[in-house]
Image (cartoon, rainbow, N blue to C red):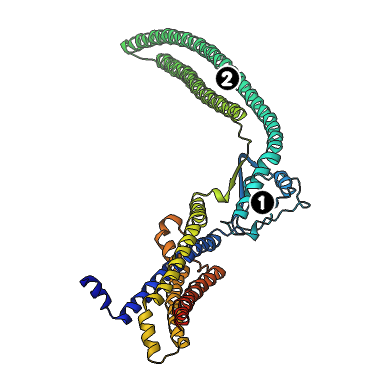
Amino acid sequence: MSKQRNTNNIDPAKRQSGSFLVLAVIALAGAFALTAPSAIAGALETSAEEEYDTGDLYDLKLSGGLGFTDNDINVLMKADCIASAGPDPGNEPQVSVNGIQGTVSVYPELYLYVKDAEKYTILSDEYHKLVNDASDHIKSNIEPSMSAAREQALIHDLHNEIKNYEENKEEAEQKKAELDEELSSLGEDYDKAVAKLESEQQNINKAKDEVFQNEKRSQASIESGKKNLSNVLDEVYSKSSVTESDLRRAQGLSNSVTGTERSLHEKYTNQWSALSEAEQQIKDDQDALKEQKEQREQEIAAEKEQLSQNAAEADAKIDSLNLQLDSGSVRWVVEKITDMPALQGIYLAHSELENLYMPAGMLIYVFSLAICLVLAASIISRNKNRIRSWRQRGLSPRIIKGVFVRRTALAAGTGALLGEILGDVVSPFAYLYINSHIFGLPYAAPAVGWLRSMAGLAGLVILPALAALLTFEIKIRGKKTKGS
């Protein structure tokens, strides 16, 4: 009884204010739950569109081991689903179906723009469907035939290239055999030349022996002449009287001996000098032959080493070409911009917001609206005594009803408006800021769903007010009429 008494003693005005506050809070929660998922999804969409602008990036990217030619671009641009294609991802490709010329330009990658893709945002299901359909079309209808043709041309070119390298290897082996023959012939020629020089040296040695013997005999003859001269001089000087004839005979003999000795000395000196020069020439020729032989041997060794290196490089190139024949590198790789890891994370978050949180928010909104209706009705029911007191004081039911309806609408509307501000404006910014390390998106602008927001706000304002009005009419005026 005391507990009930305490409850009844609570100031009705305070109790009424508390009820309106609860009504405002529930309306806030319902409006926030209704608008926040939609606003966050919209902010993700607009921010992603700004960051990954498909007009300035690409929709599809093609790559392949052999690159792409203008002929590939020509075939791609004939497809109904492709708006344009080219090697530059940043600008509109400058290639048209009628303007392609047969050139040998090879591009490592091609960037494609899907027809009508610019009409949709990058996170929309329509955009994903267009890009996926275009990717499937290329993989199924374009890439197989183009790859097959390219593979045939590749195999032909690779076989020709391998043949050229094998011919180069054969030429290198033949050249090495020729160098080996030249090296062998060089040794034989060197040996012959050395043998010839040695033979000449032997002849010089014989000539030196002959000159030595002649010089020895001449020296003996001179010594004999000097001995005769000495005898003549002794004979002349032994006479008591030397005649002029004796002097002339002695002088003539002396001149003869001296002249012969000088002449022979000059003769043999010239002969020794000539033999020394010839011997030095033979030595110089031998050194020159040896130097030429060693130099040519070094040249041949360097040429053989280069040929061996060329052969090894040719083998490596042949192995690489054979590997290309088996690797299937002609196949195209089709990459969608939607396959980018960062964009996939954004798309999954966007899908989760649309498919999970938005329906859940709608349920929370409906549940909150139902609670607001109950609260609006209970406010009238719990203030019957106060209403009765006001009527006893002379206030008309219309005035009393207007007070409660307006306060109900004001409380619900204030809460709903604050909830929509938090949901439409604050929550997208907070969401992108908190997840900036995951998405890396700038906050572009609030994406307010005006129809949803206005409908939700109207529901939270009008329906609780109607509930209060109907409750007043049924429970207050109805009873009064019945009592009367």
Residue plotted at (66% across, 53% down): 114
118 relative to 382, above or below: above
- Give percent across and percent down for residue 195: 51, 10
Q: Residue furthest bottom?
A: 394
Count of picture labels: 2
Q: Position of residue 263 (x, y in %)?
A: 46, 18
Q: Position of residue 223 (x, y in %)?
A: 38, 10
Q: At x 61% / y 49%, what residue is drawn?
A: 60
Badge 1 amino acid: Gly
Disc 1 packing (10 Å; few <14; some 14–19; many ≥20) = many
Residue 242 drawn at (x, y percent): 36, 15
Question: Which residue is outermost to the front?
Answer: 484
In the picture of the structure, the residue carrying the numbered disc 1 is: 86
Q: Give whichever of 426, 65 is nearer the camera.
A: 426
- Nearer the camera: disc 2 or disc 1: 1
For residue 176, the mark is: 2
Task: Please indicate whether residue 71 sits to the left or right of residue 228 in the image.
Answer: right
Label 1 element class: strand
Q: Amino acid at mark 2?
A: Lys
Viewed as shown, does residue 216 lie left or right of 158?
left
